[in-house]
Image (cartoon, coloured by chain):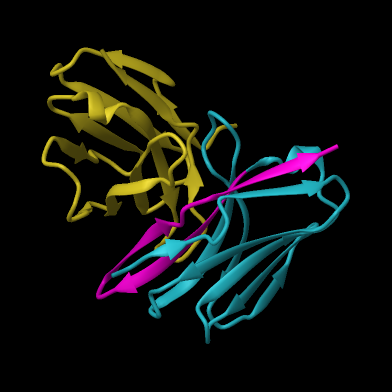
Chain colours: A cyan, B yellow
Amino acid sequence: GESVGLHLPTLSVQEGDNSIINCAYSNSASDYFIWYKQESGKGPQFIIDIRSNMDKRQGQRVTVLLNKTVKHLSLQIAATQPGDSAVYFCAENSRSSNTGKLIFGQGTTLQVKP
Amino acid sequence: DAMVIQNPRYQVTQFGKPVTLSCSQTLNHNVMYWYQQKSSQAPKLLFHYYDKDFNNEADTPDNFQSRRPNTSFCFLDIRSPGLGDAAMYLCATSGTWNTEAFFGQGTRLTVV
């Protein structure tokens, strides 16, 4: 069945270090992927997205890598800051006939130590 | 400047008493989603619309229904809330299927 999952439930990093959050997906029909950041009590906030015709996309301090061969994507955060502490979700939007839907992975809690 | 607005932010309802959560958007997006999110879990898709075309997830309980009277508004109706329905309910919109989805701040539902 469809599933989008994350390998590590919690990631603890030192302020200033780089963070890497991983995600595995199983639906080979997925053609669009999004990383969201969710702070406590708030709705998910868009970070970066990538389409299946790309393998890398960069934003401000963030990079998403997509490996379609092994159905894996990752979010890299450079120079992690205390404000980056949150839960990070990967999500896929997969097409099925004439519709698509956004499915979320399990989530990784990022803790940034000062 | 909020683009996806959910009301109320906090809702307390009695066990078995019908409750309606609302969502509005100023983005004129075609797609609207309703998610249920329980503590320390990922958002779980309940329904989504493309315009007026309604899509119900197979495992969404019959107790949950949705209405979208126009492009801007969408409602989640819980006919007989149980204790297990206590959660954060998130609304999101996107222009089409494979574009960024924008989320509201959610409604925290408590069932007493």
Work out whether residue A17 or residue B37 is closer to the camera in this orientation and state it: A17
Q: Residue at x 55, y 74 (%)?
A: A72
Give the position of the N terminus of chain B as an image quadrant.
top right
Residue B90 place in picture, x, y as percent: 40, 37
* Residue at (43% x, 43% y) in the render: B41
- Direction from residue B32 to residue B55 in the image, left or right: left
Q: Is residue A93 magenta?
A: yes
On screen, B18 above or below B63?
Answer: above
Q: Is residue A77 above or below residue B39?
A: below
In this rendering, position of residue B9 left or right of residue A20? left
Task: Describe residue A94's horizontal placement relative to residue A88 as left or right.
Answer: left
Splitting the image into 4 quarters, where does residue B111 fall?
Answer: top left
Q: Give residue A27's position: percent from left, percent from top.
A: 38, 75
Could you say where residue B100 lies in the image, as x and y percent from the top left? 52, 57
Place of residue A64 in the rendered image (x, y in percent of width and height, measured from the top left): 67, 68
Q: Quadrant of the C terminus of chain B?
A: top left
On screen, B41 above or below A72? above
Describe residue A103's horizontal placement relative to residue A54 as left or right.
Answer: left
Q: Is residue A51 above or below residue B18?
A: below
Magenta stretch prevailing secondary structure: strand
Magenta residues span A87-114
Q: Quadrant of residue A62?
A: bottom right
